[in-house]
Amino acid sequence: VQLVESGGGLVQAGGSLRLSCAASGIIFSVYDMGWYRQAPGKQRELVAAITRGGSTNNTDSVKGRFTISRDNAKNTVYLQMNSLKPEDTAVYYCNAKYLLLGSHYDYWGQGTQVTVSS
């Protein structure tokens, strides 16, 4: 199983980035997908999630700025990030989860750095 993130980088405050996470080795369409982030000295936190049915939720700090979406034909989940703030600086991780009859499948990508300058 591989989750490969891309799209991170350095951007000025107010700018935009789109992160992508390409999955392989899983039946992507049955997995719930999420984007997490971890800033230096802080715990990893959920940023946005999308279920296999397409329902989404975002953490309060990114509502109205970030949008998660998925393309099952491309086995890819996206995170569109607009109006970026310096406090959005973190390593962003892609996550895939699947629960079936007590079996728990949980995979992580290697992370992509997002740095927002003020």
Image (cartoon, rainbow, N blue to C red):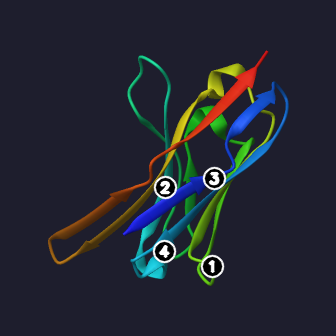
| Picture residue at 39% right of the left edge, 77% below the top | 25
Label 4: how many residues lie within 10 Å, few (<14), some (14-19) or many (20+)?
Answer: some
Q: CA distance from mark 3 to mark 1?
A: 14 Å
Which residue in the protein does label 1 denote? 74
Badge 1 element: loop
Task: Report the mark closest to the observer, 3 or 1.
Answer: 3
Above or below, comparing residue 19 to residue 118 in the picture? below
Which residue in the protein does label 2 denote? 34
| Picture residue at 62% right of the left edge, 26% below the top | 89
Q: Compare marks 3 and 1 and give the one earlier in the sequence.
A: 3
- Quadrant (top left, top right, bottom left, bottom right) of the N terminus: bottom left
Amino acid on which the number 2 mark rests in the picture: Gly
Task: Report the mark closest to the observer, 1 or 2.
Answer: 1
- Quadrant (top left, top right, bottom left, bottom right) of the C terminus: top right
Q: Compare marks 3 and 2 and give the one earlier in the sequence.
A: 3
Q: Is residue 18 left or right of residue 49?
A: right
Q: Compare marks 1 and 4 and give the one earlier in the sequence.
A: 4
Q: Position of residue 95 (x, y in %)?
A: 43, 56
Badge 3 element: strand
Which residue in the protein does label 4 denote? 52
| Picture residue at 30% right of the left edge, 61% below the top | 106
Amino acid on which the number 4 mark rests in the picture: Arg
Q: Position of residue 6 (x, y in %)?
A: 63, 53
Q: Compare marks 3 and 4 and give the one earlier in the sequence.
A: 3
Above or below, comparing residue 57 to residue 89 in the picture? below
Q: CA distance from mark 3 to mark 2?
A: 15 Å
Quadrant in which residue 101 is drawn = bottom left
Which residue in the protein does label 3 denote? 6
**Callout 1–callout 2 Cβ contact below 8 Å:** no
